[in-house]
Image: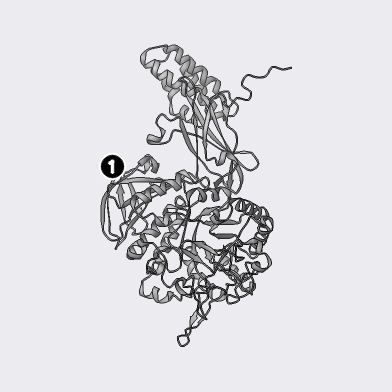
C-alpha cells in the first residue's frame, strides 16, 4: 500500500490561512453581493521565519472559472500593523452563485528584494545576492503565462544583474526597477502556493441591495372627504397611479404600499389607535381579512386585480418597482380563523390570542402559530406570495418577521426564489441584533435598521462603521428616515433642517434608503406621549395637497430629488463597504467618504460633511484620511491639495488633509463633495 502523506488531513497547509472574510456561518450561508459591488475580502495569513509571504484572492464565476485575481495587502493604519491581516477588493459582474478562494505563497521576488537591499547596503554577500537575483528573474522570464514584452524585460534585468562589468548600483537598479516591480505585481513569482477552501458568494440583482424607496397608502391618494357628513370616499389604484409620476420624478426606484387586502371589521381600531371605530373609519391595513377575503384578495375600495395590474404596469413604465407588504397575521374575521383555527393560538378559555406588546394590545390582529401545522401554513403562505409575484410583485416588505420562526423564512425565501429568481424580501425587524442578523442569514436581502434612532455624532459614526464593515456579508441596511410608526423626537422638534439632515445621511451612507409619504412636507406633529404621527394614516385617510406645497415652496421634494439624482450619477454612493469615517473637531459634525474604482479604471470619490445639530451653526476642522481617497499624483494641485465640487451648492474649493468647515443648518446643513479627478 502507498504510504500516507504526513500532511494529509491536517488543518494547516504550507502557509496558514485563517479568519477569511466575507464568510457567513463557516460558509454554510453565502455572503451577500451585488453586480459591480466592491466586496472587501480578507484573511489572516502568515508563515514561519522571515521570508516574504504573498496573499491573493481569486474570484470564481458560477461556472467555476477564474474571473478576477487581486493581490491583498495589509489594511491601512493601525488595523494592519503586525496583525498578519490582508485585505483587497473583488468585484463580481453579474448575478449568480459565485465563490472565491484565498491563496498564500512564498513571494520569491519580495524575499530576494528585501534580503538584497539589507545585505548589499551592509556590504554582505553582495555578489551572491546579485547572482541570486539574476537567476530568479531569469527563471521568471521563461514562464509561459507571461507575455513576450514582460519576458523580454525580465531577461534584460537578469542579464544586467549578472553583468559583473557594471557597477553594483547599476546592476541592483535593474533588479529593483519600476518595470520589474510592475511585472511581478501583475504576475508574482510564486512557489509553495497554499489554497484555502472555496467560499460562496451570492450575487443578487441590483434591487436586492440598491434603491430608493417611497411608501404611500393607496387609499389616501385621491381620497375625498365629504365635509357635510364627514364620510370619506377612498382612493384606489387608479387614483393612486396618478401620484406615481411625482414619485418617479423625485428619483425613487421602489413604490411600497402597506397591505392592500380586505380589512377586518371585528375590533377595528379608530383614529389614533382608539379601541372603537366609527361607521366610516377604514381601520388598519395590517388587520388583514374580512368577509371579502384574506391575503389573496384586494380590498374592494382599492379596485380589482385588473386595476392592480394596471397600477403595476404604470409603475414599471416609470421605472418603479412595486413592493407589497407581507404581513403574516389575521383580523378576527379573516377566513383562516374559521377554516384553519389550528394556525392560531387558542387560550384556555377557548378564545384566540390577539397580538400584544404589553402594555399595548392589538385586539384587531391575531398572530399566526407555526407550531400546530407548520407544513400546511407554510405552503399556504408560499401560494399567496407566488400569487402576487404572478401579478408583477418582485419585492416584499415583510412586517414583523422576527415574530415568526427563522426556519420558516429560510424555507420560504429559498422556495420563492427557486420558483422565480430575483424576488427580494425586506425585513421590518426593529428588534434585538441577534434576530435581525439571523434573518439576514436566513435569506432576507435587506432590513430596516436602528438608523432612525441614531442621531448624535457618536451614534452615527459607530453605526455607520458597524453596518459598512462588521455585518455587510449578511445584513444590508435600508435607512428609512421615517415610517407610519416612527416619528422620532429629532424630527418632531428639529424643524426643516432636521429633515434635510436625515435625508442626506440616509441617502449617502447606505445604498438603500426610504421615506414615508409626508416626509417631504415636513410632517412632524406626534400623538402626545408617543413616537408616532398624530392622526396616524394607519387608521384613517390622509389627503395631502401636493400642488399647494409645491407652489408655496414648503416641500423637501426638490432636495430629495437632488439626492436621488446624485446617487444615480455617483456609483460610489451605491456601495456599502466603501464608507470611511473621518475625524472632525466638532461634536456635532460628521464626516465620511465613499470611494469606488470603476470598470474603466476611473475613480469616483464623494466626501460628505454633515452638521447633525438642526438648531445651530457649527464650525470645525475636518481631518481626512487621504489614503482612503486614493488620490493619484496628477489629481493634486501644485500645493499638494485637490479640488472638490459641492454637488448641492455648486461651489468649489481646494481641500487637503485639514479643512475648515462651517455649516448653518438653516441654510444648508451638509457638504456633498465630489473629488475632481484632474486626469479623467
Quarter the N terminus occupies = top right
The percent position of residue 460, horizontal first and vertical second, equals: 38, 51
Q: Which residue is mark 1?
A: 639
**Colour scheme employed for the rendering of this structure:** one colour
- Is 519 left, or right, of 304 in this rendering? left
The percent position of residue 195, horizontal first and vertical second, equals: 58, 30
SS at mark 1 in the image: loop
| Circle count | 1
Q: Is residue 675 visible?
A: no
Q: Residues within 10 Å of mark 1 (few under 14, many from 20)?
A: few
Residue found 41% across the figure and 49% down from its top:
463
Farthest residue in the bottom direction? 228
The percent position of residue 42, horizontal first and vertical second, equals: 49, 36
The percent position of residue 596, horizontal first and vertical second, equals: 45, 46
Residue 485 location, quadrant: bottom left
Residue found 30% across the figure and 48% down from its top:
654
Which sits in the foreground, 181 or 663?
Answer: 663
Q: Is residue 428 visible?
A: yes
- Is 670 left, or right, of 188 in this rendering? left
Which sits in the foreground, 514 or 672?
Answer: 514
Farthest residue in the front direction? 349
Which sits in the foreground, 481 or 241?
Answer: 481
Amino acid at each position: 500500500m502507498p504510504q500516507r502523506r504526513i500532511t494529509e488531513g491536517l488543518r494547516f497547509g504550507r502557509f496558514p490561512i485563517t479568519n477569511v472574510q466575507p464568510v457567513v456561518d463557516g460558509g454554510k450561508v453565502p455572503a451577500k453581493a451585488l453586480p459591480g459591488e466592491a466586496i472587501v475580502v480578507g484573511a489572516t495569513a502568515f508563515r514561519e521565519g522571515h521570508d516574504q509571504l504573498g496573499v491573493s484572492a481569486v474570484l470564481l464565476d458560477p461556472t467555476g472559472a477564474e474571473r478576477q485575481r487581486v493581490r491583498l495587502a495589509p489594511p491601512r493604519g493601525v488595523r494592519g500593523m503586525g496583525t498578519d491581516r490582508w485585505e483587497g477588493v473583488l468585484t463580481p459582474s453579474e448575478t449568480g452563485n459565485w465563490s472565491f478562494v484565498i491563496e498564500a505563497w512564498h513571494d520569491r521576488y519580495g524575499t530576494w528584494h528585501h534580503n538584497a537591499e539589507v545585505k548589499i547596503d551592509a556590504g554582505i554577500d553582495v555578489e551572491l545576492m546579485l547572482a541570486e537575483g539574476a537567476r530568479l528573474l531569469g527563471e521568471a522570464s521563461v514562464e509561459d503565462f507571461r507575455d513576450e514584452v514582460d519576458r523580454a524585460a525580465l531577461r534584460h534585468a537578469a542579464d544586467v544583474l549578472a553583468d559583473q562589468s557594471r557597477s553594483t548600483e547599476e546592476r541592483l537598479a535593474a533588479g529593483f526597477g519600476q518595470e520589474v516591480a510592475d511585472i511581478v505585481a501583475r504576475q508574482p513569482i510564486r512557489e509553495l502556493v497554499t489554497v484555502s477552501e472555496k467560499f460562496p458568494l451570492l450575487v443578487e440583482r441590483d434591487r436586492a441591495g440598491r434603491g430608493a424607496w417611497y411608501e404611500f397608502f393607496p387609499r389616501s391618494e385621491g381620497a375625498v372627504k365629504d365635509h357635510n357628513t364627514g364620510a370619506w370616499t377612498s382612493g384606489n389604484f387608479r387614483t393612486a397611479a396618478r401620484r406615481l409620476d411625482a414619485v418617479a420624478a423625485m428619483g425613487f426606484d421602489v413604490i411600497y404600499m402597506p397591505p392592500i387586502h380586505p380589512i377586518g371589521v371585528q375590533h377595528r381600531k379608530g383614529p389614533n389607535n382608539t379601541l372603537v371605530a366609527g361607521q366610516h373609519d377604514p381601520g388598519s391595513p395590517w388587520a388583514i381579512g374580512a368577509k371579502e377575503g384574506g391575503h389573496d384578495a384586494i380590498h374592494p375600495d382599492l379596485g380589482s386585480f385588473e386595476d392592480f395590474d394596471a397600477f403595476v404596469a404604470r409603475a414599471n413604465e416609470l421605472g418603479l418597482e412595486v413592493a407589497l407588504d407581507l404581513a403574516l397575521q389575521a383580523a378576527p374575521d379573516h377566513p383562516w380563523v374559521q377554516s384553519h383555527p389550528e394556525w392560531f393560538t387558542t387560550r384556555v378559555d377557548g378564545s384566540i390570542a390577539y397580538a400584544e406588546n404589553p402594555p399595548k394590545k392589538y385586539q384587531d390582529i391575531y398572530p399566526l402559530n407555526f407550531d400546530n401545522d407548520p407544513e400546511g401554513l407554510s405552503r399556504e403562505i408560499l401560494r399567496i406570495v407566488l400569487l402576487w409575484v404572478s401579478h408583477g410583485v418582485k419585492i416584499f416588505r415583510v412586517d414583523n418577521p422576527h415574530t415568526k420562526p427563522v426556519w420558516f423564512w429560510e424555507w420560504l425565501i429559498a422556495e420563492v426564489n427557486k420558483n422565480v429568481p430575483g424576488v427580494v424580501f425586506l425585513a421590518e425587524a426593529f428588534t434585538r441584533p441577534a434576530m435581525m442578523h439571523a434573518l439576514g442569514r436566513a435569506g432576507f436581502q435587506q432590513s430596516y435598521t436602528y438608523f432612525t434612532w441614531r442621531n448624535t455624532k457618536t451614534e452615527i459614526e459607530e453605526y455607520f462603521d458597524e453596518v459598512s464593515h462588521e455585518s455587510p456579508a449578511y445584513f444590508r441596511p435600508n435607512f428609512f428616515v421615517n415610517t407610519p410608526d416612527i416619528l422620532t423626537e429629532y424630527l418632531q422638534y428639529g424643524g426643516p433642517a432636521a429633515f434635510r439632515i436625515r435625508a442626506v445621511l440616509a441617502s449617502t451612507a447606505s445604498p438603500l434608503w426610504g421615506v414615508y409619504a409626508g416626509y417631504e412636507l415636513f410632517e412632524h406633529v406626534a400623538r402626545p406621549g408617543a413616537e408616532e404621527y398624530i392622526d396616524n394614516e394607519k387608521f384613517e385617510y390622509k389627503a395631502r395637497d401636493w400642488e399647494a406645497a409645491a407652489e408655496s415652496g414648503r416641500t423637501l421634494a426638490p432636495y430629495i430629488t437632488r439626492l436621488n439624482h446624485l446617487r444615480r450619477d455617483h456609483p460610489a454612493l451605491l456601495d456599502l463597504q466603501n464608507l470611511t469615517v473621518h475625524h472632525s473637531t466638532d461634536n456635532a459634525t460628521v464626516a465620511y467618504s465613499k470611494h469606488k474604482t470603476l470598470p474603466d479604471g476611473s475613480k469616483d470619490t464623494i466626501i460628505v460633511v454633515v452638521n447633525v445639530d438642526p438648531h445651530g451653526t457649527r464650525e470645525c476642522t475636518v481631518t481626512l484620511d487621504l489614503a482612503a481617497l486614493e488620490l493619484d499624483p496628477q489629481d493634486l494641485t501644485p500645493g499638494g491639495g485637490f479640488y472638490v465640487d459641492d454637488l448641492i451648492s455648486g461651489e468649489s474649493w481646494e481641500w487637503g488633509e485639514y479643512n475648515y468647515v462651517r455649516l448653518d443648518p438653516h441654510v444648508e446643513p451638509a457638504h456633498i463633495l465630489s473629488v475632481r479627478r484632474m486626469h479623467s
